[in-house]
Image: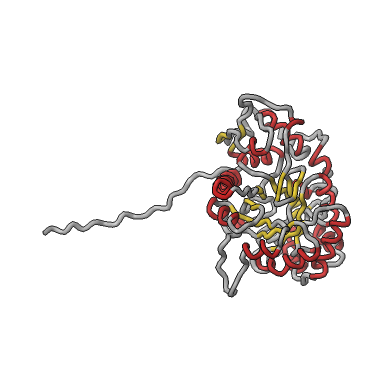
Amino acid sequence: MEVTQTMSQPQFKEMRRAYGFDDVAIVPGGHHTINPELVELSLSIGSLEFRLPFLAASMDGVVDVRMAAAFSKAGGLAVLNLEGVQTRYADPDPVLQELAVASKDEVTALMQKVYSAPIQPNLIGERIAQIKAAGGVAAVASAPMNAKKFALLARDAGAEVFVVQSTVTSARHISKSEKGLVFEDLVQQMRDIPVIVGNSVTFSATKELMETGIAAVLIGVGPGAACTSREVLGIGVPQVTATIDAAAARDTYYRETGRYVPIITDGGVSNAGAMCKAFAAGADAVMLGSILAATAEAPGRGHHWGMATPHGELPRGTRVKVGIDTTLNQTLFGPTSRTDGRENLVGALRTAMGTCGARTIRDFQKTEMVIAPAIKTEGKSYQMAQG
């Protein structure tokens, strides 16, 4: 008998193309168009209803008590970072001022020093009480390692939304602890308080997170203006592809269970065009950072930095200067004389939806999109030549 020896075929890693906001465009004008004033923008998270599908990012340069209250009154949801200067210092204003005036060469080391101060648990309750007293919805965020402890403190202090947020979050985390953070347990402990978890960029991780009973999922790894995870760790998925994949997980989960879990595109939304593309890709809401850091109400004094910027061993972020050139009201509602899409976000979203014949966000998610890397430069030679 002749024995034929076969060589095993080499296994190659297959890759697919992924797309960010600048790579795609929304196709307008389907069967009909709608007056922008008639479109519906509301967002539901758990039992809570918001007039606007916008969240303010849980970053120290974006949200403090004053911003949280103002953003709530405008119709959105602002998230306060429980591991930032607001809970480490009884009076964070001098610290924020010091961070704002530090030189570029000094700021990372200064942040590492500032954020080495211990978190004061009593300040968690104080900040929540201050937000509610000012008429805001009290939403707070923690990294997974502190979530079990801070969640109960926040619940007992009257928090209305709790966010667990890290660079990458999965439903099954392996650690040295005997029993790590179990989202099913956390959801039960928080009772009727919605728990939002992030961040995720894949179908499988997003669906598994939804299966734990959480109320919403944050989508995005590394696209934020102040985040350098993509440079330091080499990880991430462009936001349009990440949002499309997460939306598929949401819709699959909804068909299987009848429970709708919103997805929130978090990061990279630097102007109204990107925001509209996030919704067309499947988002139910967007989380905004740098675009809000440039408002007079933001605590960063014209600067913006991420939660991982002051990491003691591996900083994954930078302080970026955004300036103070607008107000929260103008950013959300206008009027604007700017042409860069950084003001009147509500008007832009309403106009985009109306142009595409979408009466609701769910309708807008069905809008056709095309791969169009030249969308920002086609026919714009005069603009480009004149800067």
Q: What residue appears at the point 72 percent right and 44 percent down from the top-left corner?
A: 43
The image's colouring method is secondary structure
- Closest to the observer, 288 or 112: 288
**Residue 325 in the figure: left or right of residue 313:** right
Screen quadrant of the C terminus: top right
- Closest to the observer, 343 or 230: 343
Q: Residue furthest front?
A: 258
Screen quadrant of the N terminus: bottom left
Q: x%, y% of residue 354?
A: 70, 30
Q: How many marks?
A: 0
Q: x%, y% of residue 116?
A: 75, 70
Q: x%, y% of residue 134?
A: 88, 54
Work out whether residue 318 can be spotted.
Answer: no
Residue 368 position (above or below residue 2): above
Work out whether residue 35 can be spotted.
Answer: yes
**Residue 83 in the figure: left or right of residue 16:** right
Residue 29 position (above or below residue 254): above
Q: What residue appears at the point 78 percent right and 66 percent down from the top-left corner?
A: 156
Q: x%, y% of residue 386?
A: 71, 32
Q: What residue appears at the point 79 percent right and 41 percent down from the top-left corner?
A: 332
- Closest to the observer, 324 or 53: 53
Image-quadrant location for residue 8: bottom left
Q: Residue furthest left?
A: 1
